[in-house]
Image (cartoon, rainbow, N blue to C red):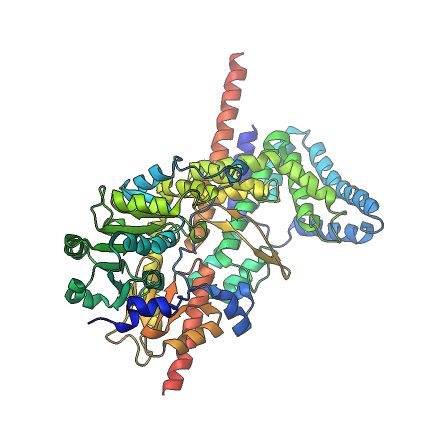
Amino acid sequence: MDNPDFSAQALRQAQVQMPEHGGRLRRAVAEYGIPLERWVDLSTGINPCGWTIPLIDNQTFMRLPENDDELEAAAAEYYGSSDLVPVAGSQEAIRELPRIRQQLFGESRVGVIAPGYEEHRYHWQLNGHQVERLAAEQIETELHRFDCLVLINPCNPSAVRFDQATLARWHQQLAARGGWLVIDEAFLDTEPQQSMIQPQMPSGLIVLRSLGKFFGLAGLRVGFLFADAEIRQMLSRAIGHWSIATPSRWLATRALWDTSWQQEARTWLESSRQRLVRLLEEALEDLPGSLQGRGLASTGLFVTVQIDDAAELAHRLAQQGILVRYFEPYSSLRFGLPGNEHEWRHLARSLTEATAAESQIQV
Amino acid sequence: MTALLLWVGVLIDLWLGEPRRWHPLVGFGRCADWLEQRLNKGSDFRRRISGLLALLLLVAPPVLICAWLMQWPLLQWLLSPLVLWFTLGFKSLGDHIEPIRRALEQGDEPEARRRTAMICSRDEATLEIERTAVESVLENGNDAVFGALFWFCIFGAPGALAFRLINTLDASWGYRSERFLYFGWAAARLDDLAGFLPARLTALSYALCGQTRRALRCWRLQAPQHDSPNGGPVMAAGAGALGLKLGGPTRYRGTLVKKPILGEGRAAACEDLDRSLKLLRYSVLLWLVVISLIQFVWILAAGVF
């Protein structure tokens, strides 16, 4: 069953809708009249206690980036594979992959996980592929209709997880007919044993990683693509020289080397995640129509709750100075981790206020 | 002999804590306020000189009297541990942190906030309780403990007394506000000078008693960004030793002040109040042991030659 809306021709004519993202703190400041520093911004899934950047030597800024610095070796060590290309944030790979696919195979039928980070869908459509949104439970039965499957694991914002055995099976199926399995592992650093990165990347398997979330270095714009030699080569050629700034390369190398920080951050993030899950479970359990049989799911860096009146709760939290991300189509809210005790208390207090008001209204 | 007197002074502090009924530093502070109100006027230059004069008027008499009394060995023995006790705020630091911790554990945020505001000059409504408390322990460890111990070792009781009085004057006058920029100049500079060596030894002992490599790295990289020449090393090394990320924007009397990040790792939580006090206690113990060893070797060497 082809989806007429996403046919190649329709796409070339009609404008493809550009996705919207979080980080709308300034808009919220204006809308709710609460000064910037009073907000607790939980609207992103970025580690609030990210890696601390050291002082950078002036020299670093004066030189052009060099591809034979230590970045690739540091990344190979951290990710356990040297079949990689450094990119200016996984966004760069997200943008280039559909183009490379178009050059190699022409128009393809692409299934993109939904709900999910919308940039994937956008760029595949933009490059003239037939794109269909797929829910996680549809994949097994529908996979035969697609050339490419684009997943996020664990998925953002739904926190849905795919196990390695399933992913390996889907990769086999797709690779057998020249297809690709693209996995965006932006939120996987807290559970690296779940990664599909292999020392030798087989053809048809493409994995994206980034320093944005776990390391808390989203502004650095450094990510990596793992794939077989052909795709790596085409990607390198497409992005050309100097796409990652020298200071970014230098800092990323140091962050990847800092194994003691990484270990500590994993422990700390895990205890924060458990704490946030507990807090939300307690706060929302009495809410009419919420959580029953649906729920609350989490990755190492955020917790997503699906509740009936998500918009109203987001609004009430914002009135208290708590910014969370509201996903309208799935009636869910995504909570990032608070960064310090001050924020934890603020969140706990605001949840109590917001839910108390809510139950009164519902009755 | 110094080491023995040092042990006695520290033990008296741990036993008695801060004098409850009348604290000599409170009286000293009143004298300082009185003088400041009378002398802090006129041109910038005159204020600067008046500040220096007021400092000498306040610090010299007690220090000279103390030094004069030290010429009788018996008085030296009896008096110097008492002077050291007066200059130390070791026990009292813990006594100020404990109610904050208790209030936090009981979930009484307003009480914890009120208690924290008492030990710093930050805005009560917006301060981050845990971060402020830990920063206060680290910084006061230098001002109210190690500085006094250091100068006691060098110049005996008068040295410790002089350090504490200068430090107290810096705390009341050493601001960059319009009122104190010139009058407080002498106190602030002298305090920087007196604190230079002890602050670095404090930073080193925090590093040795905590996560050493991390503390040294934070000291090296972050201290230069701090605007206080002594507070920088102490706080950066202390935060690194605890594996905490402290510092950052802070609100003082309604104005938001940009402060550098100190340390690295997670944010401070309730349990870190105790961790920071423990770091301070281990560092004091380290100092006492090292000073005793030095003295011991000294005595042995004197006996041999």
Asked if residue B279 can be seen in this view, the reply is no
B164 displayed left or right of B128: right
- The quarter of the picture where residue B46 lies is top right
A17 displayed left or right of B135: left
Q: Which corner quadrant holds the N terminus of chain B?
A: top right
Residue A299 vs B231, above or below: the answer is below
Residue B258 vs A10, above or below: the answer is above
Q: Position of residue B75 (x, y in %)?
A: 65, 33
A26 displayed left or right of A42: right
Q: Nearer the viewer, residue A247 or A215?
A: A247
Q: Nearer the viewer, residue B156 or A220?
A: A220
Q: Position of residue A26 (x, y in %)?
A: 52, 66
Residue A65 vs B40, above or below: the answer is above
Q: Which corner quadrant holds the C terminus of chain B?
A: top right
B34 displayed left or right of B114: right
Q: Position of residue B16 (x, y in %)?
A: 54, 47
How many numbered callouts? 0
Q: Residue at x 58, y 36 (%)?
A: B198
